[in-house]
Image (tube, helix red, strand yellow):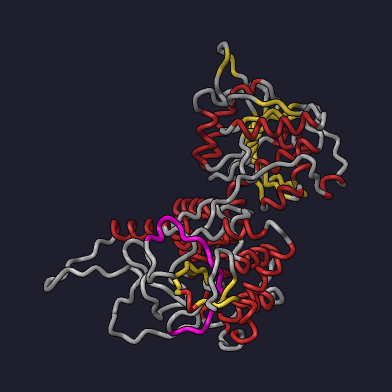
Amino acid sequence: MNYEPKVGDLVWAKMKGFSPWPARVVKPGPNSKRQSKKGSHWIYFFGSNNYAWIEQNNIKPYEKFKEKFTNLCKSATFKEAVDDIEDYITKRNEDANYDAVFESSLKTELELVQQQQQQQQQQSPKKQRKSGTNKRQSSDSPRNTSAKKPKTSSPSLKYDENGTSEEPYEEEILNLPPILSKPDSPKIDLNKVSVDLKNKNISASSMAFGFMGLGNMGSSVVMNLINSGHRVNLWNRSSQKCDEIKAQADANQLGLVQTYQTPCDVVQNSDVIFSCLADPRSAKEVVIGNCGVIHQADGCSALAGKGYVEMTSIDPDTSKDICNIIESKGGRYLEAQMQGSKKQAEEGSLIILAAGDKSLFDDCQTCFKAIGKTAFYLGTVGSATKMNLCINMALGIGLAGLAESMVLAERCGLSCKDFLEIFNLSEGASNYLSNKGQLINNRSFSKVEQALEYMQKDIKLCLDISNDVKQNLPVAAASNEAYKTARRSGYDEHDVAIVFMKMRH
């Protein structure tokens, strides 16, 4: 009796030229327009993260044929695929909801493929042939079709101009990146207080602190300010986040949170205002824009005598511009750059790099203690932003090197898991690279510690500074190109470790 696969079944799927491969039957997306043959099933291959239409007679149930097929192939990539499916089985058995999470991460639509091909066609239009019929070759096809194709150890597909899989062929381990789900927006749970914060015994300042920007880092910083007893006035482009935080605070009878509709309202009701936005442009717009920080009520500046703390990762020129604007309105200015990941922001263990008005730095000590493990005062405005960008550049270069090394190891048939285990015992290991390496090994890029777009932005700002001081940065420039290429694939909001996926493809 023939086996009839169903969506969600774990199977062995056989492609021409390959051993049976660990796989899962998945539901085809709207852009999987046609089956290669009637009675085929849309299959996701573990390890290679590829998809294909496989005929029913080439599909066998995983557990029933596990003992028979597991030892048919000795390659490292095959063994990694088996490890992947076994890891999936373990997590599914431990968590009843894991199947739904896994399913959401395996969207089979080929919209990204189509987008990339359209971009390639727009940027590099193919020249027509001088003789014979004009033939269009898939951008994923070998340039020299007469050349012998290298053998591989995992299924690989080619796609036509519509992003539809054709007959399988042997070329590379992988030729297309998987389509990833968009990361969830960060959420705040005021009941979740870190052990570090509990042990700090902070006596909160009696001043009212404004806070503008509730993104990946800002939301965690605000959580620790509130849980350490500080009064906080909130503004965010999306007012829903402000309302959620206030509702939680009111439910806990903290009475510490107020929300406002505009930045100038926050300034009017606060003694010190923190800004934690996406980029230099946003940081400047919130100051000078409509109903912004310097908006005057009744001809009087609301900033007079107040403090303004810029926590957005910006360049020194923008920081100096904002400083001049704030001081021209009678305010005090401090740049306070945050070194650390979202996890460290949640734990309250960031490193604060500050420069500017020393009296404002002193006034913010209880806040810095709540959100960080230490705070450095580096002198005049611009010093902290430069230091922060230089450190981020070093991290970005290190991660690009790690991702490239793991790609090469995988192409050589080595296990990423083994590579990471050995790397973590070497002298090059660090908490940052070890954590990023683990995200790469698990293909877990939706839990964002640092978004790809912000890392690339910081390296670009370093390159801009290097132009001003005439300092060549060849390694940073190469890393910047790697991050830019990953951004073009639509990975802006994923963790920066996803640069590995673009290098791999």
Q: Classify 285 as above or below 116.
A: above
Above or below, 177 relative to 153:
above
Q: What is the span of residues highlighted in magenta in the rendered image?
A: 17-33
Is the residue 123 above or below the residue 418 in the image? above
Give the quarter of the image for residue 333. Answer: top right
Q: Is residue 471 visible?
A: no
The residue positioned 67% from the left and 69% from the top of the image is 89
Q: Horizontal and vertical percent for residue 48?
A: 52, 73
Tell me the quarter of the picture where residue 55 sits.
bottom left
Q: Which secondary structure class fits the magenta region best?
A: loop
- Observer-nearest residue: 3 or 309? 3
What x and y, as percent, mark residue 117?
34, 60
Q: In the rendered image, which quarter contains the N terminus?
A: bottom right
Q: Residue furthest front?
A: 1
> Which of the two residues, 401 or 464, is positioned nearer the viewer here?
401
Image point 31% across, 69% down: which residue? Answer: 138
Q: Which residue is more in the foreground, 104 or 297?
A: 104
Q: Residue 482: image x %, image y %?
A: 47, 63
